[in-house]
Image (spheres, rainbow, N blue to C red):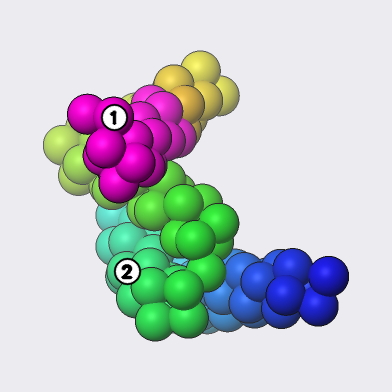
Amino acid sequence: MQRYLLLAGRNALVVILYWVVGFLLIKLTEQRGVVAADVAQVVAAGIGIALAVTLRARIALFLIAAFGAFVTAELAIHAIYGGQTVQGAPQHFAVLAAAFLGIGGGVLLVARRRLGEV
């Protein structure tokens, strides 16, 4: 039981630190536009991923990697089409779902490969 609490605590710590770093970076860049805020989120995701790998927080790694993929796609869309032209829930949900499915598929492939099934 203590092991699970330690794992949960590690994952929670990484997610909280990622959120705080992301919040601070967005506050520093929000006056410069949507693309700058997206870049700040990508940087925060990179920091969060590095922290999750260092602390071996796999659940946090999955969540932050999926959100990092989402924000990277948003950055590309906003950089090409502008921050105000590509807005709305359907676009955000489609990109977010694609990010989670992509990262989740990669996790499953790696897990199957480790078990020798692929």
Rendered position, 95 above or below 55 = above
Which residue is disc 2 drawn over?
46
Q: Position of residue 23 (x, y in %)?
A: 56, 72
Question: Considering the numbered disc 2 on the image, is that residue within a helix, a strand or a loop?
Answer: helix
Question: Considering the numbered disc 1 on the image, is that residue within a helix, a strand or a loop?
Answer: loop
Residue 78 at least partly seen = no
Quadrant of the frame with the C terminus: top left
* Mark 2 → mark 1, Cα distance in angstroms: 31 Å
Which residue is disc 1 drawn over?
117
Quadrant of the frame with the N terminus: bottom right
Q: Residue furthest right?
A: 1
Disc 1 packing (10 Å; few <14; some 14–19; many ≥20): few
Instruction: Pick whichever, 113 or 41, lies toward us.
Output: 113
Tell me which numbered mark, 2 or 1, is placed earlier along the sequence.
2
Q: Amino acid at mark 1?
A: Glu
Q: Position of residue 58 (x, y in %)?
A: 49, 61
CB of mark 2 within 8 Å of CB of mark 1?
no
Q: Amino acid at mark 2?
A: Gly
Q: Residue furthest left?
A: 80
Q: Residue at x 47, y 26 (%)?
A: 97
Q: Residue at x 44, y 21 (%)?
A: 94
